[in-house]
Image: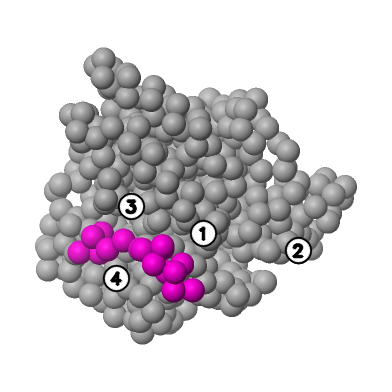
């Protein structure tokens, strides 16, 4: 198998028996064995299990028991998703020997869809502390250039999808942790509406802000993964009891007629992006306008207000979750995570309540603006992925985040590749939809991908490794 297929491409071939799940899995396994020593995308590869699951899938399909578009598709799981009989570490010494007895709901659903599990993927420690070099495993590296950061915290998920080690992966997103790796690694990543995907069995960072969602090469692939994982779950008290639509039904409609509001002040005034990113954003807006989207500028409260409120809530809830471990096993956390968690101890109850009150006000403002448009568009990141050694200890605290507003609001939001910067690394925009309107969000992302050639350009990590 010379080219890496998307999930959608592989599914069509598998269904008509033109592609063997066994051969597809073997190709992914070979890439893992070749690239894992440099990319460190996995904590726990499960290649023998994957080979057996691929054989089972092939036998099922041969006898006519095809389960759907994820049957026989190799995937990876962020290592905060609990897996029965397979260790779940959160990339931390704290859980180095943790082997759950039950699967997270998403894991169970993906297995039921017939996926092939290639292994558990690297993350920032407990989805917050990283990239760190004082943990039992090194941080994941960017397939476009292994000297570059993947973004976090779904670091291994972004790296593994971009490098073709898996065709799809799970992530979590409390303040951008799906969308940032998607942006820096040049893949697609969607944070669904809060409550759309169950978090049962996923290790928490901040209960009121955590989202679960997929990363894949394309918007279409994200739609297929979301279709398999969305839905109400009584095990998760935050799970939304809402009908699950067909996320693929409108993909082919394109962007004509969609009303898109550009949150320009986020990336021009509140946190100015690099020139190449600004140019790519303007080009993407131009492509959407030319394809029939109705474009207008909109204004939201300044980015710093959203970031400040979310940071207070995240650190408060994160400290509460990890308080006992901080007391009993302080030095079994990496330095970056333990110092960040300790900030939560300094936040008072009045401060936390004030942040929640401001959250409600900000969300009301967003809802008013969204009445006039179908989607928002703004930057995903300020530029290309930074050098790994240049990521500061307090990275993410120095500038307001483009992504945090939409964790605070719970809105569905997605990172989409819009080109490449001067160092040959991916650039991205962020699209934001109305609550529980992921179909429109995915329609716009897929429509844009079809207008451009960016999805035809894959990283060649083996060549990058050779050049190092």
Q: Is residue 112 above or below residue 370?
A: above
Secondary structure found at label 2: helix
Which residue carries the number 3 mark? 217
In the displayed structure image, the side of residue 5 where residue 145 appears, left or right: right
In the displayed structure image, the side of residue 271 where residue 334 appears, left or right: right
Secondary structure found at label 3: loop
* Residue 39 numbered tag: 1
Visible residue check, residue 331 = yes
Which residue carries the number 2 mark? 335
Q: Residue at x 63, y 75 (%)?
A: 392
Quick check: is 275 in the magenta stretch? Answer: no
Q: Nearer the viewer, residue 270 or 212?
A: 212
Q: Position of residue 190 (x, y in %)?
A: 39, 51
The reply to whether callout 3 and callout 2 are in contact (CB within 8 Å) is no
In the displayed structure image, the side of residue 206 where residue 330 appears, left or right: right
Q: Is residue 78 above or below residue 383?
A: above
Q: Give the prevailing secondary structure in the magenta stretch.
A: helix
Q: Residues within 10 Å of mark 2 (few under 14, many from 20)?
A: some
Mark 2 or 1: in front is 1
Real-space CA distance between mark 4 and mark 3, rounded to the nearest whole angstrom: 14 Å
Q: Residue at x 32, y 73 (%)?
A: 420
Give the residues drawn in magenta, as a range: 453-468
Visible residue check, residue 151 = no
Real-space CA distance between mark 2 and mark 1, rounded to the nearest whole angstrom: 22 Å
Secondary structure found at label 1: helix
């Amino acid at each position: 198998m010379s080219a890496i297929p998307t999930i959608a491409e592989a599914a069509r071939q598998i269904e008509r028996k033109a592609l063997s799940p066994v051969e597809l899995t073997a190709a992914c396994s070979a890439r893992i064995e070749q690239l894992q020593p440099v990319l460190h995308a996995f904590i726990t590869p499960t290649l023998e299990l994957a080979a057996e699951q691929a054989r089972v899938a092939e036998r099922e399909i041969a006898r006519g028991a095809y389960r759907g578009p994820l049957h026989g598709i190799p995937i990876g799981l962020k290592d905060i998703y609990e897996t029965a009989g397979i260790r779940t570490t959160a990339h931390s010494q704290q859980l180095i020997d943790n082997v759950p007895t039950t699967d997270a709901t998403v894991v169970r659903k993906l297995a039921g869809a017939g996926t092939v599990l290639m292994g558990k993927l690297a993350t920032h420690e407990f989805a917050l502390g990283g990239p760190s070099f004082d943990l039992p495993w090194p941080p994941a590296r960017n397939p476009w250039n292994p000297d570059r950061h993947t973004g976090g915290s779904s670091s291994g998920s972004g790296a593994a999808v971009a490098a073709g080690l898996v065709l799809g992966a799970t992530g979590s997103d409390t303040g951008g942790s799906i969308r940032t790796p998607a942006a820096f690694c040049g893949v697609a990543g969607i944070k669904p509406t809060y409550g759309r995907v169950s978090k049962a069995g996923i290790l928490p960072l901040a209960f009121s802000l955590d989202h679960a969602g997929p990363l894949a090469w394309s918007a279409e692939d994200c739609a297929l993964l979301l279709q398999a994982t969305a839905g109400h779950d009584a095990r998760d008290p935050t799970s939304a009891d809402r009908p699950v639509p067909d996320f693929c039904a409108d993909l082919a409609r394109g962007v004509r007629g969609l009303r898109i509001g550009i949150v320009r002040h986020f990336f021009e005034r509140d946190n100015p992006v690099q020139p190449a990113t600004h140019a790519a954003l303007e080009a993407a807006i131009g492509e959407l306008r030319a394809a029939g989207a109705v474009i207008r500028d909109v204004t939201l409260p300044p980015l710093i207000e959203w970031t400040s409120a979310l940071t207070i809530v995240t650190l408060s809830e994160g400290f509460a979750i990890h308080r006992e471990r901080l007391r009993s096993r302080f030095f079994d956390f990496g330095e970056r995570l333990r110092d960040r968690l300790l900030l939560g101890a300094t936040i008072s109850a009045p401060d936390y309540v004030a942040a929640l009150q401001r959250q409600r006000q900000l969300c009301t403002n967003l809802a008013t603006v969204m009445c006039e448009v179908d989607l928002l568009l703004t930057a995903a990141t300020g530029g290309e992925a930074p050098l790994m050694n240049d990521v500061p200890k307090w990275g993410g605290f120095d500038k307001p985040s483009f992504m945090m507003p939409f964790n605070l609001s719970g809105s569905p939001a997605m990172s989409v590749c819009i080109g490449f910067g001067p160092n040959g690394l991916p650039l991205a925009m962020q699209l934001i939809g109305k609550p529980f309107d992921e179909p429109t969000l995915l329609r716009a992302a897929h429509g844009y991908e079809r207008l451009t050639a960016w999805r035809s350009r894959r990283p060649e990590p083996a060549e990058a490794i050779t050049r190092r």
